[in-house]
Amino acid sequence: MALVRLGQSLARRLHRPLYLPPPPLPPPMDYHAAFSRSFALTHSGACLRGFASLTYNPSSVIGHKLRGASPVHIVKVLDLVVHLDHTRPMSTATVSKVTAGARKVSLKLVMTSPGFVYEPYSPRERIPFWKRWFTLSGWRRTKEDIIMEMKNAYAVSRLRKKTGYTKKQFYDQALNIYKEVNTLMAHGDTSALRKILTERMHSTIKNELKRRQSKWSSVHWELVEPAVSIRTLRARMIGLDKKDLDKAFIQLTLEFVTKQKFEAYNSKGEVVSGDKSKEILVKDIWVFERSLFHPGAYWRVCGRITL
């Protein structure tokens, strides 16, 4: 009987559900220590970019949930650590205070010249009529020529609209500039050249004068007027803003065919080159530039083309 009662008791115990003892309560958590560990993991694994790159809510700090009340003071600790680590938070804004009597000075940069010749002129080889209209290469050449002429016409139309450009008036002005530049170069007056040359062209002329002075002590130059011929070879517009067509520079390439007199002297005043009693025919290709948006803009020489 005793064995029967023992067996029944064991059977009842086996059919009871298994209950595990409750887990021990964790020790109180130090919020500052928890934050320091989480920040160390984040800083070593990724680049901290400020508050905008961190996951923070009242119950979570950088992905680590904390029990109890919301540790608001951790935000201040985070800001302190970021600044101590020499990293500027992107979400913070600095407010600058202007002292009494101080003035705000705005720096405005103004482009006076692009500093280069856009699509420099070069003569194009003539092609026969049959090749232009009955070959694939001739059709391509015709297309290129049409595009170039459209660019010329567009630049001149914008120039005429903004400045009242006329060919005769511009040619007279360009010839005067051509004469003035050559005269000042003959005298070696680089300071006066600065006004009628762009910055880059002025630097080029100065270097040329230094090389010339190492060979010749002085020169005589004279223009025989009127000019034999002046013609426009190319017109280009350099735009600075697609939304504002007036913010642009115009470059006109002119060919001057003139008669000139030239003579060079050494340090003793002896003639070493040229003859001022004879006229020589000279062909020059110069590029003139003007702004369409600067008040009081005028034409300046921005380049010369040698063929």
Image (cartoon, rainbow, N blue to C red):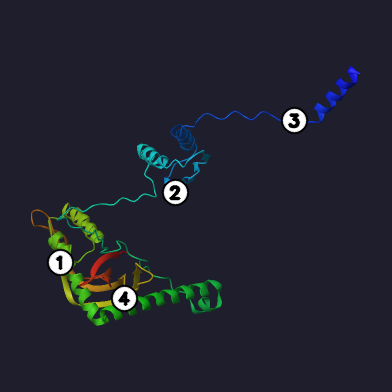
Residue assigned mark 2: 52
Label located before the other in sequence (4 or 3) = 3
Relative horizontal placement of residue 19, taking residue 51 as reference (left or right): right
C-alpha gap between disc 4 and disc 1: 23 Å
Mark 4 or mark 3: which is in front? 3
- Of residue 4 and residue 216, the one placed in the foreground of this image is 4
Q: Which amino acid type corresponds to the residue marked 2 in the rendered image? A: Ala
Q: Is residue 201 shown left or right of residue 241?
A: left
In the displayed structure, would residue 140 be above or below residue 69? Answer: below
N-term mark: 3 or 2:
3
Secondary structure under the numbered disc 1 in the rendered image: helix
The furthest residue to the front:
1
Numbered disc 4: secondary structure: strand
Along the line of sight, the residue nearer the viewer: 237 or 229: 237
Query: Which amino acid type is shown beneath numbered disc 3?
Result: Leu
Q: Residue 47 appears at what percent x and percent y?
A: 45, 41
For the residue carrying disc 1, how many other residues have a C-alpha within 10 Å: few (<14), some (14-19), or many (20+)?
some
Residue at numbered disc 4: 232
> In the image as oriented, which residue stretches furthest toward the top?
2
- The amino acid pointed to by label 4 is Thr
